[in-house]
Image (cartoon, helix red, strand yellow):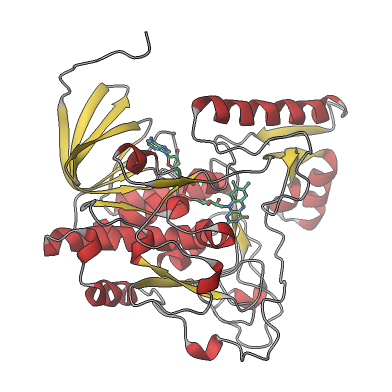
Amino acid sequence: MTSIRLTQEIPLRGSYDVVVCGGGVAGVGAALSARRAGKRVLLLEKSLFLGGLATLGLINFFVPMCNGRGRQIVTGLAEELLRLSIRYGYDTLPAEWASGEPGPGAKTRYVTRFSANIFALTLMEQLLDEGVELLLDTVVSSPLMEGGRCRGLVVENKTGRGFYEAGMVVDATGDADVLARAGVPTVLGQNFFTYTAAGITLDSCRRAAESGRIQDALVNFSGGKATLYGQNQPVDEKLYTGVTAEEVSQYVTRNQRLLLQTLKAQDRESREVVALPGMAQLRTTRRIAGDYALTTADQYRHFEDSVGAICDFDNRDFLYEVPLRTLCMDGFDNLLTAGRSAAATGYAWDVLRVIPPAILTGQAAGTAAAQALDENKPVSRLNVGRLQASLAAQGVLVHFPDELVPAKEAPQGERFDTGHI
Ligand SMILES: Cc1cc2nc3c(=O)[nH]c(=O)nc-3n(C[C@H](O)[C@H](O)[C@H](O)COP(=O)(O)OP(=O)(O)OC[C@H]3O[C@@H](n4cnc5c(N)ncnc54)[C@H](O)[C@@H]3O)c2cc1C
């Protein structure tokens, strides 16, 4: 037997203007934006709290939202969520950026660490207070397609199998799982071997007690230590795509064994592992092909359909604009993606997938979804000027200012590393 055929009546459990699949930072951005545009929004999340890799995955660090010369580039909801992430928990925000742009001469970049768990709690409160409906512990299993339109989504949860009708669908699963199953062309990535858990040691606790800063108590414990550039990649370890259950399980368990091996060699009274990552720390798994895929050759390029400006996190100056076409594909009228499954290649994918741009593309996808319903148009045929005006009114910097582009003869892309993980 190579397959089975299953025919089943599935109950209709609800009908929404916009259904967002996945409650990582991109999904939260999409849900909030569609809701603020007056839509009935359902957010479906397979885990028990919001934030995805940024919280559950223990990647609790906003990479730089500035150009490395004191000017903020990523704005709008990304700014709002950065401030929310540190409202009730610790931060590592440089003093220069505490109350806005420091301008030329800035010695630091606009970054912060935050408490993963407290951020997850505040995201939940924000969504519910604004009227987004939320189902946790709910896995989106498949979209129901009728030609190029998605009628809705089949989900699995405690209640059983159910169907939610959707006017628009945003796939923010991080892996483009839903859009791939809808037939949207996708591209696979490859991942180095990385696993970081959160812990405390007697020494770190002493340091925190002396400094009075709770974040000094936290340390990282590692399995794989590979960086996004492949440094520290074990020679005998393969690259992982991370889009099959077997690969994800192998990636996680091999990393967990490595971590356990390190822990076994330590004094068991001297440290504690406070949290293991609840998601596989895979950076780039699957993204949509997109009507346009951003590349590093697009540095300093303006796009007519830009939905926001972003910056390079490791290098000064480099700026990009994100075209709406990276979030959708012609022929799939009511489907969008956001976050780390937006279309980009090589290092441009890295620049686009990190937390601030993921929130930005979430905001763009939620706003575009609402507008597509209002205009009764396929998302790839939206009135882009209207979308940009709406994003600008929400505080998004749609186009980077030309004055921030360095002169051709000036040194460019100087490394300005911020120690992200
Ligand atoms: C090792 C590593 C280090 C990184 N370092 C940094 C850093 O220092 N700073 C930075 O800014 N970024 C960093 N990043 C990148 C950043 O964390 C992510 O790219 C970003 O958080 C992605 O957000 P997202 O919302 O697109 O996706 P995700 O965070 O992956 O969220 C997807 C959500 O969808 C849910 N989901 C998935 N499938 C389903 C389904 N079928 N049904 C329902 N729910 C589903 C998941 O549970 C999850 O909550 C790092 C990433 C990795 C892996």
Q: Is residue 303 visible?
A: yes
Q: Quadrant of the N terminus?
A: top left
Say which of 220 and 95 sits in front: 220
Taking the image as shown, residue 11 lies to the left or right of residue 174, namely: left
**Residue lying at 18% horizontally and 58% vertically, measured from the top left:** 378
Quadrant of residue 411 within the rendered picture: bottom right
- Picture coordinates of residue 186, whole percent (x, y): 41, 46
- For image coordinates 30% across by 13% down, the residue present is 4
Asked where in the image residue 302 lies, by quadrant, the reply is bottom left
Seen in the picture, residue 176 relative to 29 is either above or below; the reply is above
Is residue 36 visible to us here? no
> Which residue of the protein is positioned furthest toward the top in this rendering?
1
User: Percent position (x, y) of residue 185?
Assistant: 36, 46
Q: How many marks?
A: 0
* Residue drawn at 33 percent across, 43 percent down: 179
Relative to 364, is 415 on the left or the right? right
Q: Is residue 22 above or below residue 26?
A: above
Q: Residue furthest front?
A: 2
Q: Position of residue 276 (x, y in %)?
A: 63, 34
Left/right of residue 402 with respect to residue 317 in the rendered view: left
The quadrant holding residue 6 is top left
Name the foreground residue: 31 vs 195. Answer: 195
> Residue 154, how many percent across, how many down?
25, 31
